[in-house]
Image (tube, coloured by chain):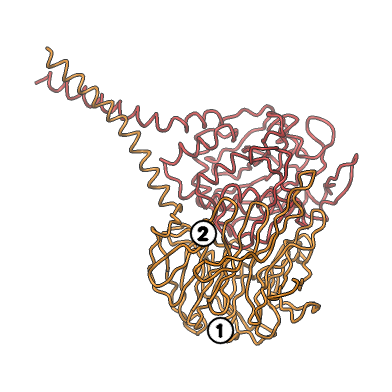
Chain colours: A red, B orange
Amino acid sequence: MRRRAATVVLLVIGFTAAGLAGAVAYFLPVLATTLGATGQSVVGALTQRSPSDHQPFTVLLLGSDDDAKFVPGHLLTQSMILVRVEPSSGHVTMLSIPRDLYVPISSGGTAKIDTAYADGGAATAIATVEQDFNVHVDHYVWIGLRGLVNLIDRLGGVDVVTTNPVLDDFYPADLAGGNPYGYQRVAVMPGAQHLSGLTAMEYVRSRHDDLREDFGRSERQQQVLLALRTRAHTVGLTDLPDIASALSGEILTDLSLPEVADLLPIASGLQLGNVEHVLLLPPVTSDATVDGQSVLQPDWDRIRERVAQSFP
Amino acid sequence: MRGRLALTVLLVALMAGFGLAVYAGLGLVHRLHDRGAGSASADPAELRSLLRLPGSVYVASGGDLLRVRDDAVGTVLHHDPARRWMQPAVVAAGGSLLVVARGADSSDLYAAGADGGGLRRLTDDAAAPLRDGSLERNHWAFHPRAGADGRVWYSYDAPKAGFRVDLAVWTRPATGAAARWSSPVGYTGGDVEPLPLASGGVVYVRHLIDDRTRIRSQLWLQTGPRDPGHALTTTDDDCSQPDLAPGGATLAMVCTQGGQTAHLEVAGFDGRTLGTPRVLAAGALCAFPTWAPDGSGLAYLAPAPDGGDFTLWWLSGAAGATPSAPRQVLDGAALDATSRPAWAS
């Protein structure tokens, strides 16, 4: 009798272990990507508020071109968006920082802000934003160009109301696998539509035929980010390995895995009407030329006054 | 002893099989979920018509041009590596079609029969790269429409200069040279979606930067090629994609108020001005309302109810005071929401 019971227990343990092994094998890419991407240390970071504290917190979103034109580890940030989340009210503020903004860099000297990440990674980018904008950054998330394309495709695309025809005769053909310095033509039609990863990237990255230059691009980036959040509602547990594979090596964050898990319900509860968009349009910035390069000169008094209102 | 060994081997094999089954089962759940989450097939054989509309409705899907007639969905034009078909328009109540063939760096207008036969290219917009690799000699032609007088109206990206590539409204007669009608605001993407009027004028969508540095679209009416024209809607309304009901007294359009929802609206039109608009569908992503040839209602594009791909919807009695609730026309479709449905009687 006892022997039979022991056999049954052994069988249950055996089948459970086999089932778990199958599940672990399935979710292995998730484990590998999350271990590689999350919990990045940021040297010099200040005290951090966690999404689980239910206190307002800030996240610096960084996006980089990481094609063959660039040296890995020294990437410029084409996109910098500072996000403040108030978990209690669900209010979100998104401040797009123009990549050409000419600022003091925390590691020394004055340059376009897109060089901060190339100079010293996330720590320098965060410290530069903190010192120049008088804000506190709790966390950061960096994503590469291919990572965003892959992520959107793995989510099945995003639904966006594109504001105007986005046309560009000099769009970089750097994702096609050929000459990364070559060109391709872009024409994204206006109106409500479903965008694939590549078309969404063309929409948010093109800037040559936009009277508002980088500001127009920043607005489009915010639109796609929010559309991405809507699409994330459709993600199920079994989709995660596919998404993790798509993001492998293309995403980095100092958020720990439990903090990412805490963030997901906040993100899914976000209402579009509760999102405040901030762009640093003229007169708080103005065009200038420094050492032969086109830059945006900040009016720090006005910028800090505006930022203090939205990032108290 | 030998029997026990065999039993042990069998159990171990079953356990391994169970582990593999868990792995495969999770993958299967993922694939099924993937299919449900908006990756509907564009294969006409898998499309189902849920509603019978009068006449033929042409829609674009995955680079193919489809025709919905009675309960059947068929492919009229198949895409190939060099050409993806989009933005169909009917000519002479559906006797023939205008359609855009989009390539990697240019697009051309084509004329075709109602069944896709007799293809004839109307423009020649592809050009070889310049020595530095730039492609600026290529052109885009989009949004064709046929006027009652036989002229073809479309948006075309000329003239260009440097980084500036803006679409303008152009028209070409059956014989003779094409002529530009509109002067777009630079670096906005320009003027699109011409809607020729029986009076000889044209309504189109103008993009501009408003006094708060926001990019907005406005319906614009122009009576002649040198007429500066005037706005039919405000920049705050942010309206586009106009279509005029048979008889020309009611105009359907999509307005976003600068947001990420696209309302379906209709308004009276007296040939010069628009009346107060009425919202027929709000809180959704509506695209390209298209009147039935008999004016009995509107077909338009919007995502399927489960948040899936854009599909075809029908709104009966749209011009009246009490339109019916929208009804889904196609099931399983992934339609190109930048292509207006073309409706032939």
Say which of B86 and B247 sits in front: B86
Q: Residue at x 40, y 32 (%)?
A: A26
Label 1: element kind: loop
Dot 2 or dot 1, earlier in sequence: 2
Q: Residue at x 52, y 40 (%)?
A: A52
Residue A189, quarter of picture: bottom right
The location of residue A299, given as percent across then percent down, is 84, 49
Relative horizontal placement of residue A226, taking residue B232 as reference (left or right): left
Relative horizontal placement of residue A198, taking residue B27 as reference (left or right): right
* Residue named by callout 2: B64
Q: Residues within 10 Å of mark 1 (few under 14, many from 20)?
A: some
* Residue named by callout 1: B246
Residue B196, quarter of picture: bottom right
The amino acid pointed to by label 1 is Pro
On screen, residue A92 above or below B173? above
The location of residue B143, given as percent across then percent down, is 64, 67
Q: Which subunit holds the residue at mark 1?
A: B
Please check whether the numbered discs 2 and 1 fall on a single chain. Answer: yes
The location of residue A45, given as percent across then percent down, is 67, 31
Relative horizontal placement of residue A283, taking residue A83 as reference (left or right): right
Q: Residue at x 35, y 27 (%)?
A: A21
Say which of B126 and B267 sits in front: B126
